[in-house]
Image (cartoon, rainbow, N blue to C red):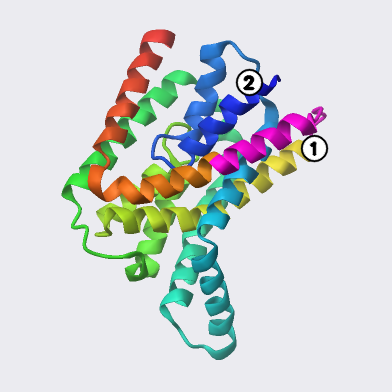
């Protein structure tokens, strides 16, 4: 892998992990379009770590408050808005962990093809637009209870299918449950911390059991670029999502799906 390929893939990961357009789908498609070799598991791990660094750095203050409140709730059995939010993030992470362990290998083996990605990009893009158009959009992320957390968590498990988009499907579920756009996005990003950490750990376990050569220089480059890009992406999206809505992302997903069908169909 050369530095240009590493930088392009890292930028794509940093943007598409947090924009509702599917990071896994784009990372499958980019090598196809440019005729590049598959980047391999080691590089995927580095990109996941980079986006994890981005979301932890951006939400460092609320994450610190949530963590301290969670430990306090264990000790004193007293609930606060931050501790309830922390418990909901934990609860919402369980479905993707269970589904990933049970079906992750089969999903990666059978569903990583461009035409499947085109279908999920289109279907879940339209679903996202409908949730944005029809949702009440009156609640903040602190209004999420255990039932809503489970529903959003189950939606996140669907993102194991390439082309679905983890942020897209969790924002869709949040909107469907009455959250505002920015609240749905913030809860999605908080949910990304354990979600991306588990995905990275899963890839790391596969890497340790494989005989794959590791290019530490390119991995470091990819990690840094994906972290910077991801941080900037979170900042911009939270600033503009209430103004622009989700229709532009739906139209982009349909446009990419059409290109895929024309190219690979």
Near mark 1 (Cα within 10 A), the count class, few <14, some 14-19 or many ≥20, is: few
Above or below, 251 relative to 114: below
| Residue 112 seen | no
Which of the image's four quarters has the N terminus? top right
Near mark 2 (Cα within 10 A), the count class, few <14, some 14-19 or many ≥20, is: few
Q: Residue at x 59, y 49 (%)?
A: 52
Judge from the rendering whether residue 150 lies leftward or rightward of residue 204; answer left or right.
left
Residue at the disc numbered 2? 4
From mark 2 to mark 1, how far is it between C-alphas?
28 Å
Residue at the disc numbered 1? 209
Residue 50 placement (x, y as % from top left): 62, 43
Please tell me the numbered disc located at residue 78: none
Residue 139 placement (x, y as % from top left): 26, 65
Q: Secondary structure at mark 2?
A: helix
Which portion, as a residue range, is magenta? 209-228
Q: Residue at x 51, y 58 (%)?
A: 93
Q: Secondary structure at mark 1?
A: loop
Residue 43: in magenta span: no
Q: In the picture, residue 264 is in which quadrant?
A: top left
| Residue 184 seen | yes
Q: Residue at x 47, y 36 (%)?
A: 15
Q: Residue at x 52, y 88 (%)?
A: 77
Q: In the picture, residue 121 is in which quadrant?
A: top left
Q: Main secondary structure of the magenta part?
A: helix
Residue 223: in magenta span: yes
Return the disc, 2 or 1, that comes first in the chain's sequence.
2
Residue 143 placement (x, y as % from top left): 32, 70
Judge from the rendering whether residue 69 lies leftward or rightward of residue 254; answer left or right.
right
Above or below, 257 relative to 175: above
User: Relative to the observer, which residue lies in front, 203 or 108?
Assistant: 203
Count of residue discs: 2
């Amino acid at each position: 892998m050369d530095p240009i390929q590493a930088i392009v893939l890292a930028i794509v990961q940093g943007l598409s992990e947090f924009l509702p357009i599917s990071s896994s789908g784009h990372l499958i498609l980019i090598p196809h379009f440019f005729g590049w070799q598959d980047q391999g598991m080691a590089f995927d791990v580095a990109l996941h770590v980079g986006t994890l660094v981005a979301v932890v750095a951006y939400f460092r203050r609320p994450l610190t408050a949530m963590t301290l409140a969670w430990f306090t709730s264990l000790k004193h059995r007293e609930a606060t808005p931050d501790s309830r939010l922390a418990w909901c993030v934990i609860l919402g992470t369980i479905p993707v962990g269970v589904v990933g362990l049970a079906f992750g290998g089969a999903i990666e083996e059978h569903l990583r093809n461009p035409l499947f990605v085109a279908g999920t990009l289109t279907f879940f893009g339209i679903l996202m637009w409908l949730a944005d158009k029809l949702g009440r959009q009156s609640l903040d992320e602190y209004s999420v209870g255990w039932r809503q957390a489970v529903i959003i968590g189950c939606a996140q498990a669907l993102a194991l299918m390439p082309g679905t988009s983890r942020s897209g499907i969790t924002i869709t579920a949040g909107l469907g449950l009455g959250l505002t756009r920015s609240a749905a996005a913030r809860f999605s990003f908080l949910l990304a911390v354990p979600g991306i950490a588990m995905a990275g750990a899963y890839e790391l376990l596969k890497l340790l059991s494989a005989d794959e050569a590791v290019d530490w220089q390119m991995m470091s480059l990819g990690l840094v670029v994906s972290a910077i890009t991801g941080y900037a992406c979170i900042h911009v999206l939270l600033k503009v999502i209430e103004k622009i809505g989700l229709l532009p992302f739906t139209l982009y997903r349909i446009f990419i799906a059409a290109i895929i069908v024309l190219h690979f169909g």
